[in-house]
Amino acid sequence: SFFFICIYAHIARGLYYGSYLYMETWNIGVVLLLLVMMTAFVGYVLPWGQMSFWGATVITNLLSAFPYVGNELVQWIWGGFSVDNATLTRFFAFHFLFPFVIAGVTILHLLFLHETGSNNPAGLNSDADKIAFHPYFSYKDLLGFAVMLLALT
């Protein structure tokens, strides 16, 4: 989908500009990618057709490769010893809860990004051109939200 194309373009930009050097921000971004992929996967299973059933069976069985805890993890995700209605219920719950987790991790990702600063490939000092985010952009966004709210009601 277009959403994943944007994510991959964001990753490619980060690789090109060396953003991976900021390890905390990069690692949180990797966690975000995995969470988005998990959300898409559990959403793929929800129609509960043959493709969904076998996709859930194959992909969740990959987790059994983890030593010591793999089989128990698979059985916990399945809700039993095979993919059945309990699995569908759990995947629906995951599909509902993951976006809230993604929102929280996104905020954490942005906090780390603001802490380290965006990458500056040209190495230019742009402190003289900067203005504070709050109150200038906060009020601008609030005004834009109010205008859209009035226009759409």
Image: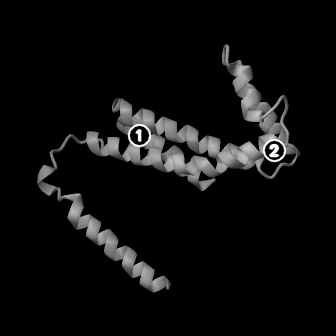
Q: Nearer the viewer, residue 104 or 126?
A: 104
On the question of residue 120 being in view, the answer is no
Sort mark 1 into few (<14), some (14-19) or many (20+) by Cα contacts within 10 Å: some
Q: Nearer the viewer, residue 142 or 80?
A: 80
Quarter-wise, where is residue 2 in the image? bottom right
Question: Circle 1 sits in a helix, a strand or a loop, which is it?
Answer: helix
Q: Nearer the viewer, residue 76 or 12?
A: 76
- Asked whether, in this view, residue 1 is left or right of residue 102, the answer is right
Sort mark 2 into few (<14), some (14-19) or many (20+) by Cα contacts within 10 Å: some
| Coordinates of residue 43 in the picture (x, y in percent) | 70, 49
Q: CA distance from mark 1 to mark 2?
A: 33 Å
Residue type at the position of mark 2: Ser
Question: Circle 2 sits in a helix, a strand or a loop, which is it?
Answer: helix
**Which residue is found at the position 81% from the left and 34% from the top?**
57
Q: Is residue 88 above or below residue 83?
A: below
- Asked whether, in this view, residue 131 is left or right of residue 23, the answer is left
Q: Which residue is mark 1?
A: 14
On the question of residue 19 being in view, the answer is yes
Residue type at the position of mark 1: Gly
| Coordinates of residue 5 in the picture (x, y in percent) | 56, 49
**Which residue is found at the position 23% from the left and 61% from the top?**
134
Quarter-wise, where is residue 113 in the image? top left
- Asked whether, in this view, residue 104 is left or right of residue 112, the answer is right
Q: Residue furthest left?
A: 128
- Asked whether, in this view, residue 66 is left or right of residue 13, the answer is right
**Which residue is found at the position 72% from the left and 43% from the top?**
90
| Coordinates of residue 101 in the picture (x, y in percent) | 52, 46
| Coordinates of residue 44 in the picture (x, y in percent) | 74, 48
Q: Which residue is mark 2?
A: 52
Q: Is residue 36 above or below residue 31?
A: below
